[in-house]
């Protein structure tokens, strides 16, 4: 019954009738193809840009490719702010990008300058998201070029002012 269902070559024991040299050759080919598929198929991620929270307050951050773009946007009456972009006090966060950060900053950012916005938990709680968006408020804004990031070892620090 299994031979009818699977066919002769797809039967679970089909390798027992094959000579050993073909088994090994097939295994080597499968291994090489699997290796190539996993190494070439994966996109490179660059995670060297690190945001460091040196304050005693939880902060929220947003990275923008131009100063014209403001990270809090309103869509269909709802404010879309990524609260997953959180850094707790005295912690740091590595930011991943599928290109390199150098390429992203030099090719996609206006004036080859990356903008990082920081919002304190206190600002969001007291002022509210509506006012933050309306008046374009932020706790701190960093405008960085690749050479600035290289000098700081790709770390951007937030400290209380």
Image (cartoon, helix red, strand yellow):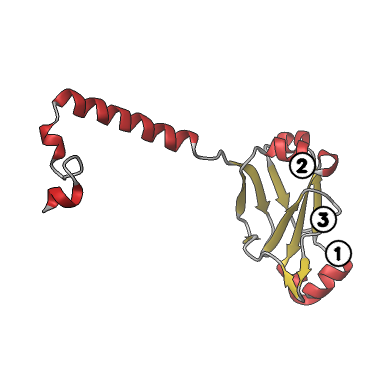
Farthest top residue in view: 21
Q: Is residue 157 above or below residue 30?
A: below
Q: Helix or strand or loop: what does disc 3 sit on?
A: loop
Q: Residue at x 38, y 32 (%)?
A: 33
Q: CA distance from mark 1 to mark 2?
A: 22 Å
Residue placed most toward the observer, 77 or 147: 77
Question: Upstream in the sequence, badge 1 or badge 2?
Answer: 2
* Quadrant of the snapshot with the N terminus: bottom left
Residue 115's place in the image compared with 88, above or below, is above
Q: Residue at x 65, y 60 (%)?
A: 85
The answer to whether residue 115 is left or right of residue 61 is: right
The residue mark sitting in front, 1 or 2, is 2
Q: Earlier in the sequence, mark 2 or mark 3?
A: 3
> Disc 1 marks which residue?
136
Which residue is the site of mark 3?
69
Of the pair 94 and 157, the residue shown nearer to us: 94
- CA neighbours of label 1 inside 10 A, class few (<14), some (14 to 19), many (20+): few
Residue 121: quadrant of the picture: bottom right
Location of residue 136 in the rendering, given as x and y in whole percent from the top left corner: 86, 64
Q: Residue furthest right?
A: 135
Label whose residue precedes the other's in the sequence (3 or 1): 3
Dot 2: element: helix
Residue 155 visible here: yes
Residue highlighted by disc 2: 108
Q: Kindly identify the residue that appears in the image at 15 percent across and 36 percent down.
A: 15
Give 138 or 53, whichever is nearer the viewer: 138
Q: Position of residue 111 (x, y in %)?
A: 85, 40
Real-space CA distance between mark 2 and mark 3, rounded to the nearest whole angstrom:
13 Å
* In the depicted structure, whether residue 92 falls above or below residue 86: above
Residue at 15% across, 39% down: 14
């Amino acid at each position: 019954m299994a031979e009818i269902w699977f066919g002769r070559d797809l039967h679970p024991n089909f390798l027992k009738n094959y000579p050993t040299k073909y088994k090994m050759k097939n295994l080597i080919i499968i291994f090489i193809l699997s290796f190539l598929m996993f190494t070439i198929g994966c996109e490179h991620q660059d995670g060297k840009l690190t945001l460091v929270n040196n304050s005693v307050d939880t902060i929220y951050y947003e990275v923008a490719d131009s100063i014209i773009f403001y990270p809090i946007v309103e869509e269909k009456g709802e404010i879309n702010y990524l609260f997953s972009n959180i850094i707790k006090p005295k912690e740091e966060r590595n930011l991943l990008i599928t290109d390199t950060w150098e390429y992203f900053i030099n090719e996609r950012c206006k004036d080859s300058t990356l903008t990082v916005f920081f919002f304190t938990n206190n600002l969001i709680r007291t002022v509210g998201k509506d006012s933050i968006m309306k008046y374009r408020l932020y706790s701190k804004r960093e405008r960085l070029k690749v050479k600035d990031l290289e000098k700081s070892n790709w770390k951007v620090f937030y400290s209380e002012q």
